[in-house]
Image: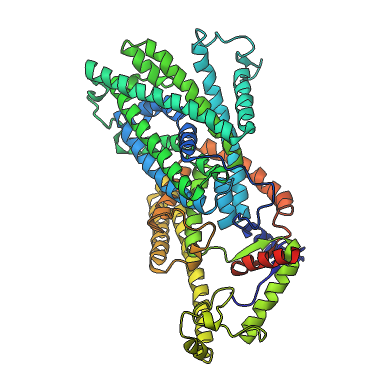
Amino acid sequence: MGLVDVQNAGSSPSSSGSFSWGFQSLIRRKQVDSANNKPEGTQLAKELSILQLIALGVGSTIGAGVYVLVGTVAREHTGPALTISFLIAGIASALSAFCYAELASRCPSAGSAYHYSYICVGEGIAWIIGWALILEYTIGGSCVVRGISPNLAFFFGGEDSLPAFLARVSLPGTDIILDPCAAFLVLVVTGLLCVGIKESSFAQAVVTTANVCIMVFVIIAGGYLGFRNGWVGYSLPSGYFPFGFNGMLAGSATVFFSYIGFDTVASAAEEVKNPQRDLPLGIGLALAICCVLYMLVSAVIVGLVPYYAMDPDTPISSAFASQGMQWASYIITAGAVTALCANLMGSILPQVSVGTLLAFTVVAISILILRYVPPDEVPLPLSLQDSIDSVAFRYNKKEIDGNNPEDPPLCTCCAVDSVEHKALEDCHLHPGDAQASLGYPLIMKEKDEDKVNDKRRRKLAAGSIASVCIGVLLAASTASAEFLPDLIRISVGGVGAMLLLGGLTVLLWIDQDDGRHSFGHSGGFMCPFVPLLPVCSILINVYLLINLSLGTWVRVSLWLIIGVFIYLFYGMRHSSLSDAVYVPTSQADEIYRSSSEHLS
C-alpha cells in the first residue's frame, strides 16, 4: 500500500454517511488469530492428536445417516443404486473438505466456517451463517437425541417399556410430545463436553470405535448372508436404477447430509497439537472412512432385502431379522444407540462452530477470496493507537522522502516491499551495485506501477468472484425451477452460465495474489485446483440448497429475518470491531513490535 490508510470503524456516522457506515460494518473483517492478538488466558488447551481428530470426525458424521436414511432413501429415490448415491455425495463433500482443510490449517481457531467467513468475507455474512446454523444444529441435535429413545426402548422390551420417568408424554390437546429421556441425554452429553475436550474426545473415541466395529459386523455378517441366501435385492426386474438416473441424483442430494460432521474437526482446530499437519489429515481421513463405511453397508443392506420392502425406521436390523438373524438386531440396535450418541456429541460440540451447506458455500467462496483478494487491512485495538501513529508516520515519511535521513543507506533492489529494507552492506548484490540503484528513479516508478496493476488485478478478481456467485445462483435456480416457462428458464439460465464461465475464465487467466503466502499460518495444506475446485463446490452446494423443500425455506427465512433485525439494531453497534482501527496488513507486525517495546 502507499500512504497508511487508518480508519476507525467505530466512529459515529453522520446522517449523510450512515449508509456508507452501515455497509462498511457489514464487510468489516477480523484478523487471523495469532500470538500477537490472542488475549492472554483465552487460548484453549492443545490436547487433540490425529487419532482423536479422526474419531471426532467419524463419530460426528456416522449416525442417523446410515441407521435411518438408508431405508428411506432406498425406498423413495434410489433402489439398489443407493451405493452410488453415497459415492456421489461423498465426492461432493470432499470438495468442501479440501476448502475446509486449507482454512483450518491457516486459521486454527475455534469457530470453523463462522470464523473463516468473518476473516475472509465480512461480519454480516458471518453473522447470518452463525445465526442460521445455531438453529440447524439445535434442531439436528434434537432430532438425533429423539431417535435414541425408540432404540433404547428396544432393550426394555418395546416402545412403551421405558421406565415411567423416561417415557414420552403427550400434552393433551396438542401434537407436542415431551421426551424426558432425550432431555436427560442432552444434559449428560453437554456436561461431558464441558468437562474438557480431552475427556470428551476420549469418550467420543470409545463410542466411535464401538460403532465402527458394529458396522464392520454388519458388512461381514450381511455379506455372508447375501452369498448364502442370494442377493435378492439385486435380482429385481426393475433393475439397478428403478427410479432412473434422476432418482439416484435425488438420493445423492438427500444422503449428502449424512456427511455433515467432518467440519466438527475444523471447529476443534484451536485444541489440536499440530493443526497445520493434523487438521487436513483428520478431515480427509474421517471423510474417507465414513464414505467407505456408508457404501459398504448400503451395498449389503439393499442386496439383502428388496428396496420396496425395507423398513424406513430400522432398515438394518429389520434386514437381518428377515434373514433369520434376530439376535443380530440387539447388536445393531446397540450400534444405533452408540452412533446417535456420538452424533449428538458432534451436534452439541459445534456450538463453538457452524456447518452444513450454507457454510460449505461460504467456505468455498472464502478460498477464492483468500487466493485472489486476501484482506490487505487488519483491525487493531484502540489501545495501540500510539504505536499505530508512530509506524504510520515512519511509513509516510519513507513514502515521501524515500528513506529516513537518520537511517543508514538502504537497499531498494532486494526488499522494496518489505517493512525493513536491508542495509547496503547486507545486500545480496555488490554494495556498489546497490548504491547505484539508489540513483535510478525508475525503480520507484516501477514500484508505483506495480501498485496500480495490483489494485487493478484485485478489482478484476473481486468482480470475477462476484460474477461466479451470481452466475451459479441464476443457473442453479433455473435448472430447478421446472414451473417456469422454457423461454424464461433458458434465457435466465444462459445469462447465469455466461456469468459463471466468464468469471471462472478470468480467475484462471489472472495471477493469484502474492499475499496468499503470508495470510494466516503458512506452511500447511493448500487446496488443489483453485479456482476450479471451489467453484465446483459452490455450484453443487447452491444447487442442493435451492432444492430444499419450500417448508424448510419458509422456516429458515423467518429465523434469518429475526437474526437480521438483531444484527442491525444490536450486533452491528456492539461488535468487537466497532472500535477497531484498520491498518495495512504489512504494518501489523511492526505495530505489535513497537507496542511491545513501549511496554518494556
Q: Position of residue 142 (x, y in %)?
A: 58, 28
Q: Position of residue 503 (x, y in %)?
A: 42, 63
Seen in the image, is 138 located left or right of residue 96? right
For the C terminus, which image quadrant? bottom right
Q: Is residue 453 above or below residue 320?
A: below
For the N terminus, which image quadrant? bottom right
Q: Residue at x 52, y 13 (%)?
A: 153
Q: Residue at x 66, y 48 (%)?
A: 564
The foreground one among 104 and 480 is 104
Could you say which quadrant of the image residue 173 lies in? top right
* Res 448 visible: no
* Res 70 visible: yes
Could you say which quadrant of the image residue 530 lies in? bottom left
Seen in the image, is 414 located left or right of residue 386? left
Q: Is residue 154 above or below residue 265?
A: above
Q: Is residue 285 above or below residue 368?
A: above
Q: Position of residue 454 (x, y in %)?
A: 50, 74
Q: Position of residue 494 (x, y in %)?
A: 38, 58
Q: Identify the image's colour scheme: rainbow, by chain, secondary structure or one colour.
A: rainbow
Seen in the image, is 469 located left or right of residue 17? left
The foreground one among 569 and 83 is 83
